[in-house]
Image (cartoon, rainbow, N blue to C red):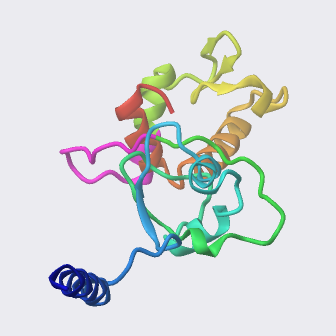
C-alpha cells in the first residue's frame, strides 16, 4: 500500500512539474549560431533535411538579403514554420564579418579610394591574370570594355550587390585581404 501511494504521489508530482515548467515542444523555435561557410539552405537542411525553412528563417530574423549572413550571427529557427512552397535555390556562402576599424569614420569615396589603392595602386591599366583595372575586377564583369568609366560603373554595381556599400567592401577587405 505504501508503494502504491508513493508511486501515485511521484506521478502527480512529475505531472505538476511538467505543467509548472512547461513541456518541450519538438517544434519550438531554436537558436542557431551561423558558422563560416553556412548558407540559409544549409542551415535549413541541418534542421529539416531540405531547404524548406529558408524563407521563414529569413523572415523570422529580418534578413533582407538571403545571400548575406555572417559567421557568429544568431538565428531563431522555427521548424514548425516549414514552407509548403517550392524549395528555393542554394544561396551564396556566408561572408565573414569584419570588426569595425578603429580609425576615423569612413565615407564611400574614401573607402572606394582605399580599395583602389590596395588593389592596383589606383591604376586603371593594372592587370593580374584575369583581373583588370583599378578595382581588379574579373575581366568577364567588364565584357571587354576596360575604359575607366566602365570600370567605375561595374565596380559600383559589384560592391552594391555584394557588400551593400564601399564601407562594407572595405571592412570585408580588411578582414580577408580581398573583396
Q: In which quadrant of the rendered view does residue 74 lie? A: bottom left
What kind of secondary structure does the magenta stretch mostly adopt?
A: loop
**In the rendering, at what x and y percent does residue 88 appear?**
77, 57
Picture residue at 24% right of the left edge, 80% below the top: 7
- Asked if the magenta segment contains residue 101, the reply would be yes
Q: Is residue 106 left or right of residue 82?
A: left
- Asked if the magenta segment contains residue 51, the reply would be no
Picture residue at 60% right of the left edge, 74% below the top: 80
Of residues 22 and 161, the one nearer the viewer is: 22
The quarter in which the N terminus is drawn is bottom left
Q: In which quadrant of the rendered view does residue 150 lie? A: top right
Question: Which residues fall within the magenta stretch?
Answer: 96-112
Of residues 144 and 41, the one nearer the viewer is: 41
Of residues 163 and 157, the one nearer the viewer is: 163
Q: Is residue 11 above or below residue 46?
A: below
Q: Is residue 144 left or right of residue 65?
A: right
**In the rendering, at what x and y percent does residue 44 appear?**
61, 55
**In the rendering, at what x and y percent does residue 149 appear?**
70, 40
Amino acid at each position: 500500500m505504501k508503494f502504491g501511494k508513493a508511486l501515485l504521489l511521484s506521478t502527480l508530482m512529475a505531472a505538476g512539474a511538467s505543467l509548472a515548467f512547461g513541456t518541450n515542444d519538438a517544434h519550438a523555435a531554436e537558436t542557431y549560431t551561423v558558422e563560416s561557410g553556412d548558407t540559409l539552405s544549409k542551415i535549413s537542411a541541418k534542421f529539416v533535411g531540405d531547404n524548406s525553412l529558408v524563407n521563414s528563417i529569413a523572415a523570422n530574423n529580418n534578413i533582407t538579403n538571403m545571400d548575406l549572413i555572417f559567421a557568429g550571427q544568431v538565428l531563431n529557427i522555427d521548424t514548425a514554420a516549414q514552407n509548403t512552397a517550392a524549395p528555393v535555390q542554394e544561396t551564396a556562402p556566408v561572408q565573414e564579418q569584419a570588426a569595425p576599424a578603429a580609425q576615423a569614420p569612413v565615407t564611400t569615396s574614401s573607402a572606394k579610394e582605399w580599395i583602389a589603392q590596395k588593389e592596383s595602386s589606383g591604376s586603371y591599366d593594372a592587370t593580374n591574370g584575369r583581373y583588370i583595372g583599378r578595382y581588379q575586377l574579373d575581366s568577364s564583369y567588364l565584357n571587354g570594355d576596360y575604359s575607366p568609366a566602365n570600370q567605375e560603373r561595374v565596380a559600383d554595381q559589384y560592391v552594391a550587390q555584394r557588400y551593400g556599400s564601399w564601407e562594407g567592401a572595405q571592412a570585408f577587405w580588411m578582414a580577408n585581404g580581398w573583396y
